[in-house]
Amino acid sequence: MEQILDNTEEFGSKNIKKLLWQYALPAVITQIIASIYNIVDRMFLGQCVGALAIAGLAITMPIMNIIHAFGSLVGAGASARMSIVLGRRDIRWAEKILGNSTLLTFLFGFLFVSTGYFFMDNILNMFGASADTINYARTYMLIILPGMFLTTLSFNLTGLIRASGYANKSMWIMVSGALLNIALDALFIFAFDWGIAGAAWATTVSMLFSSLLSVIHFLQPTSFIRYKRHCWTPKLYIFRNILAIGISPFSMNVAGSAVIALLNTQLIRYGGDLAVGANGIVNSFAPLIIMLILGICQGMQPIAGYNYGAEKMDRLKEVFFLTMKCNVIIGIIGAFLAVVFPKYIIMAFTKDPALIALSIPAMRYLMVLAPLIGFTITNSQFFQSIDKPWVAIVTSLSRQVLFLIPIMFIVPPVYEHFHLDGLMGVFCSCTICDFLGALLSAILLYSQWKIFHPRHIQQHIN
């Protein structure tokens, strides 16, 4: 029991501001590094291979998002559940979560790797690949698929490392993998001239490294939550507990992938392959802001989950509002940079004048409401952390499914009717949906305000 006190009891007693900083800072650093190595991939490819390589990589993004969805289905659900049960001081249950979540990761990994190899071209065509971009996309995916399985394993285990009180160790595992990726990018793309294949190999090797470090942590006797024989026994109720929370980020990522496929179709229709490339550039900068926001939310998650499990609702409320404040400020900074200095950001990825011209308005449309995106993400992540998956699901999916799918087929023709650029109408659709998604998120938050009042919550934990 002393080890629990050393590792997790501070979640329920330490000053919230200091605690959020202590756990958010490592997560933010991890997210920044992860964003940088994703950006480096695109910068190296854009400068060394060309605009079509960026477009080909953009085609793979929804597929990779689906794979990440399975990682978040297990990883986010397992880490949130572990925080809650540690709030109730149940080590044996936490160990079962560790083992069963690892089993789920291997199961899903086998499914998506085998499916991807068997139906590669069909999948790429479905997500908007053209004759000019499919070779780039295929080359990348054939190498990256095993690496994506390793990414989901690493995501799951580092989340559990953080939930069990080792925030700095979780950070260093992810940061070391990301820095290795950047170094290998330079080696494989520049020195070896492997092109887009080099980017894929760099990611795969670095994720293998991070995964091995994560597994080693849970094999060490010094880790108070670690692999034991009993944790490998499949338990349906553990699977259910993990998946019930993880279904929110899973649904968001799957829906996002489907929406990106439809969005790519609209972008090609109104602007061609370069429009897809422009969107790819924006989606290289935007994750830098989104991952900062998610980093703060990851710091919040074990604190919120623990205090929810321990029924300390005043602390739960305090960490929620502090996280919200931080993330809205991050969104304001991101929006300012994207709206005022878009050309300087875009020129880091390409020198192609046509691609730069398309990317500038895209950057402004897609990033202007970043503060509202921060608000919406915080709400979704918070409800996911306290075992309110349906609220998190509705909050996450409203922008992508409820609003964006119909609106991006309505607004572009309206633009053209008034003799405006239909492609700008596609980008404007995303802006409209950011606003509507935040509005619905605010309504849902108001409807759940009662969670901040002390009450018996045993029924939600079992």
Image (cartoon, helix red, strand yellow):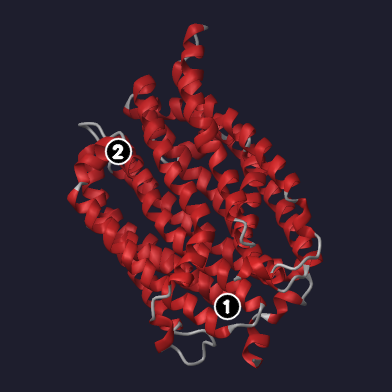
Q: Position of residue 145 (x, y in %)?
A: 28, 57
Label 2 near label 1: C-beta < 8 Å? Answer: no
Sequence-first disc among 1 and 2: 2
Q: Nearer the viewer, mark 1 or mark 2?
A: 1
Local crowd at mark 1 within 10 Å, few (<14), some, or many (≥20)?
many
For the point 52% across and 84% down, the residue is: 225
**Image vertical order of residue 98 relative to residue 332, above or below:** below
For the point 36% across and 54% down, the residue is: 67
**Image vertical order of residue 61 relative to residue 31, above or below:** above
Callout count: 2
Q: Position of residue 408 (x, y in %)?
A: 48, 25
Q: Quadrant of residue 456?
A: bottom right
> Does residue 24 appear in the picture of this structure?
no
Local crowd at mark 2 within 10 Å, few (<14), some, or many (≥20)?
some
Q: Which residue is mark 1?
A: 164
> What is the quadrant of the C terminus in the image?
bottom right
**Image vertical order of residue 328 relative to residue 152, above or below:** above
Q: Which residue is mark 2?
A: 50
Q: What element does badge 1 sit on?
A: loop
Q: What element does badge 2 sit on?
A: loop
> What is the quadrant of the N terminus in the image?
bottom right
Nearer to me, 446 or 138: 446
Nearer to me, 337 or 259: 259
Nearer to me, 321 or 281: 321
Q: Amino acid at mark 2?
A: Gly
Q: Position of residue 229 (x, y in %)?
A: 40, 88
For the point 54% across and 60% down, the residue is: 245
